[in-house]
Image (tube, rainbow, N blue to C red):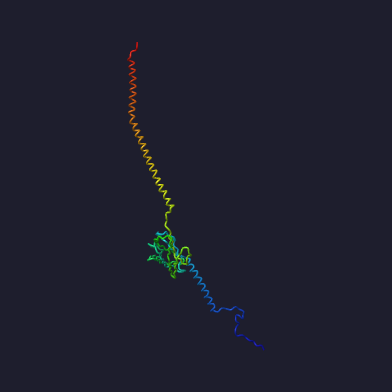
Amino acid sequence: METVVSRSKPLCAAEAGASPTRTSSQHWHAKKIFLGVTMAAALTLAFAGTASAHVEPSPSEVQAGSTQTVAFTVEHGCGESPLTQVEMQLPAGLTAVSVPETPQGWTGTVTDSVVTFQGGPQPAHEEIEFAIQATFPDAAGTMLGFPTIETCEQGTVEWIQPVVSGEEEPEFPAPTVTLTPGVAVTAAEGNAVAPESSAAAEGAEPSVGKNESDSEEASTTKAAETSDASSTNFLPYALIGLIGGAALVIAVTMMRKRKAADTPPAE
């Protein structure tokens, strides 16, 4: 008689030749790792986008000692959060600072050495421009930084790292304006002005020569007029003399004829 032995436990997956299955805890652990990697990638992209969206001044170069209006373009909000405030630290040496105009729905105030713009909210992916007017210091070659802080509905972005000429730009650079020399008159330009003066002087010289020529011409004309006048005054006397001489000749001729007529012929 055969004895049949039955197993009460099912074969495990390994014994059955099937691949092992994950427990619920293993699934949750894998899910957390996936979410963590995804969040890290998203944050990296968000910060990379924010860092590349600078606050740019226009113009970025201003003549030293001049009064100019400079516009600062905020290119991005705080990641995905809309912009609601911009604070800008003014550099030393700036005077007569004012806010000429503001975007619609925004206000601008100057307090001590800080300009504050409030309003919005400005969509995170839309740029906005804020302008200030000021008299810049007379220090050509100087780079003036305007450390700026963006405040959004959620979070802030600080553009406060100084920019140094000749060095690599930092990750969050402060907006920077460079002061340029004024328009100087060079030696060449100075010499270029001299011929104009010389030309003016030369232009005056012919005038003097012309006056002298006019004087000589006037003198000659006057002498000619005097000569003509003298000739004119002498003419009557000359005519009288000619007439008198002719009359004398006629009279002498008639006398000779009469004398010849009165003389008897010789016998």
Quarter of the image for the C terminus: give it. top left
- Percent x, y for residue 133? 40, 61
> Which residue occupies the foreground of this view, 257 or 50?
257
> Which residue occupies the foreground of this view, 11 or 63?
63
- Percent x, y for residue 161? 45, 67
Toward the top, the furthest residue is 267
Toward the bottom, the furthest residue is 1
Toward the front, the furthest residue is 187
How many badges with numbers are in the image?
0
Residue 163, above or below 197: below
Taking 24 as reference, is 257 left or right? left
- Percent x, y for residue 234? 33, 30
Rendered image quadrant of residue 227: top left
Residue 86, above or below 10: above
Residue 71, above or below 214: below
> Which residue occupies the foreground of this view, 246 or 107?
246
Rendered image quadrant of residue 119: bottom left
> Which residue occupies the foreground of this view, 196 or 232?
196
Quarter of the image for the N terminus: give it. bottom right
Residue 103, above or below 14: above
- Percent x, y for residue 90? 40, 65
Taking 2 as reference, is 99 left or right? left
